[in-house]
Amino acid sequence: MLGSNGLVSIAGGKLTTFRRMSERVIDIACDRLREQGRRLPGHIGASDAELLSGGDTGDNVEEYANRLARRWPGVAKDIVNRLVDLYGSNAERLVEAMSADPVLAERLAPPLPVTRGEVEYAVREEMALALEDFLERRSRLMLWDPDNGLSVAEGAARIMAGMLDWDPEHTAQEIAAYRAHVEHIKSFQGEAPDAETAQAAHG
């Protein structure tokens, strides 16, 4: 059900129909985003033909990460560890790609193990469409990084801008909105400012 506020709600469902229901929800969300002029990543695969990847690493996650690090020694161990923690066995594709193209392994802000490859993966395969999507919900930096991901915000925004066709104004709005979001969360204040107000406050 699509509410007047744009919230898509589902109820009921069962194991035999969850794929069809989830595809319908995604179709509705994509239609709404297109109406807003948002550029969406290309469609990848089909749920009726491919199993969903669970990123299973087996029982010993540390040994799995060590195995990837030994196989591709050109990628820093802390980067490998981070990708395995986030993506499980799906990290293997990222590490292999970073080994083949060192640009993907470039850190957005030393010494954090957050890379260009991680940002591109989040946009391409996890539908991160806003800077906040990446920093809070995909990378989890807002929760676990001491500076809440602010040190990588501009670098991540530039990469996302190139992939999502953001112009400089929109890119600046994304950065300002994320900074305002962090300040709001840390201050425990009332309603967060909108992006336009945030941009004015941060130049």
Image (cartoon, grey):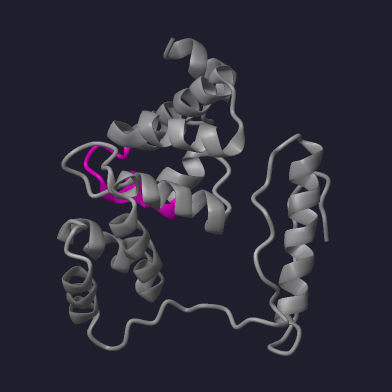
Residue drawn at x 71%, y 70% is 22
Please state, as top left, top right, bottom left or bottom right, where the N terminus lies in the image.
bottom right
Res 46 → quadrant:
bottom right
48 vs 2, nearest the viewer: 48
Q: Is residue 80 left or right of residue 155?
A: left
Quick one: quadrant of the C terminus?
Answer: top left
The answer to which of 5 and 101 lies nearer the viewer is 101
Residue 44, position in %: x, y?
65, 64
Residue at 76% in and 84% down: 17
Q: Is residue 78 above or below residue 67?
A: above
Residue reaching furthest front? 100
**Image location (x, y in percent) of residue 161:** 53, 32
The answer to whether 95 appears left or right of 63 in the picture is right
Question: In the rendered image of this protein, does residue 52 appear above or below residue 6?
Answer: below
Residue drawn where x is 57% and y is 17% of the image: 169
Q: Nearer the viewer, residue 120 or 87?
A: 120
Total number of numbered discs in the rendering: 0
x, y percentage for residue 95?
Answer: 31, 63
Q: Is residue 138 magenta?
A: yes
Magenta span covers which residues?
137-149
Q: Position of residue 121 (x, y in %)?
A: 46, 54
108 falls in the magenta region = no
